[in-house]
Image: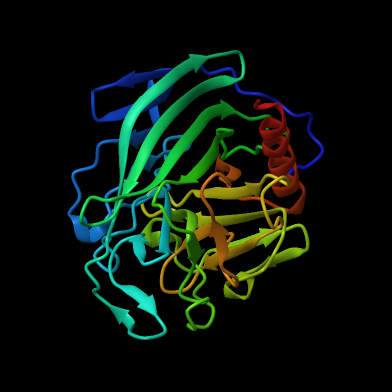
Amino acid sequence: MPTTAPAAVHTARLDVTDDGAALTFTADGKPIATYTYRPTDPQYESPRPFFHPLTTLGGDDVTISRPWDHVWHKGLSWALPNVGSHNFWGGATYTRATEYANLDNNGAMTHTAFTGIEHSAAGITAAESLTWTSQDGGPVIAEARRFSVQLLADGGAGDETGGAYAILFETRMDNISGAEIRIGSPTTEGRHNAGYGGLFWRGPRSFTGGEFRNQEGAGTDEFMGTRSPWIAFTGKHDVSCRSSTVAFVEDGSNPGAPNQWFARSSMFACLGSAPFFSAEVPLRAGEPLTYRYAVVIADGGVDQGRAAALAAAAQTALGNWA
């Protein structure tokens, strides 16, 4: 693919509608991202807001939700499996004492209100407040969340591509439980290379066996647990046989950055930020934790040049997002 073409920003008109349960973002009237903020999932799946479907500007879906193998996977969502004694990921919980077990500890992230939805030249930003509660309804975390949908410059777009956009995501978590919380993962509880928990994406079935890429090169499952400022995944769609790319970019101001990535190509395609992969992070009252990311949704595959250019454009968008 060409990598020397001048960067172009697609000029599609972005808009958003609210049906009382979900926000739907459109580009020139075509849906590209739906954010369900009032889910109806069972408690076992740790109900929480999520993005699904996510669709490229060219019209290809790049998420699935409630797959039969892990029904608690929800497109793209902020999800944490080991929050003290609570599970905000869904499904069974892994601990040293029990390994995987159903512990009746599946909490919920409940939408309180949108504190603002703003249109700007850069894109559309929503600010949201949420309360995290334990399975029995007790308060655990108060979260202030923001996310923005923005079109990106994409100088490497080829004939099969329709360009790229990014979802900028920011979470600030405050401990309201009355006791210190240590946030970890199955790996911090002793399960090797299972450090999932963070902003997590589940890709279509046809993406299984796709390719990861970061600034050092390309590969598959060997990217599990690696650290890099950005990481991209390219997969192929059934029927259309086109490719699409999803890339994660971490804000350098995040605690511990660059943090590890949870990256899997075999079994099924998934990718997620994993700031609690190998070590627990304390969340103390009055000492909130803030994490920021950009998730790029791009038509077409990427070579090293285009991947780096998309990551740079997303990093610039994060830097300009006050």
Q: Nearer the viewer, residue 266 or 79?
A: 79
Q: Position of residue 313 (x, y in %)?
A: 71, 35
The residue that appears at 35% across and 34% down in the rendered structure is: 34
Residue 57 appears in view: no
Q: Residue at x 42, y 30 (%)?
A: 128
- Where is residue 40, by image quadrant? top left
Question: Residue 117 location in percent, x, y?
Answer: 44, 18
Horizontal side of 222 relative to 306 (left or right) equals left
Tell me: 187 left or right of 64: right
Residue 221 sits in quarter:
bottom right
In the image, residue 45 lies at what x, y percent? Answer: 25, 58
In the displayed structure, 148 sits above or below 4; it is above
Number of marks present in the image shown: 0
Q: Is 22 drawn above or below residue 191 in the view shown?
A: above
Q: Nearer the viewer, residue 131 or 310?
A: 131
The quarter of the displayed image where residue 260 is located: bottom right
Q: Is residue 163 visible?
A: yes
Q: Position of residue 113 (x, y in %)?
A: 34, 26
- Foreground of the two, 252 or 136: 136
| Residue located 70% across and 48% down the image | 307
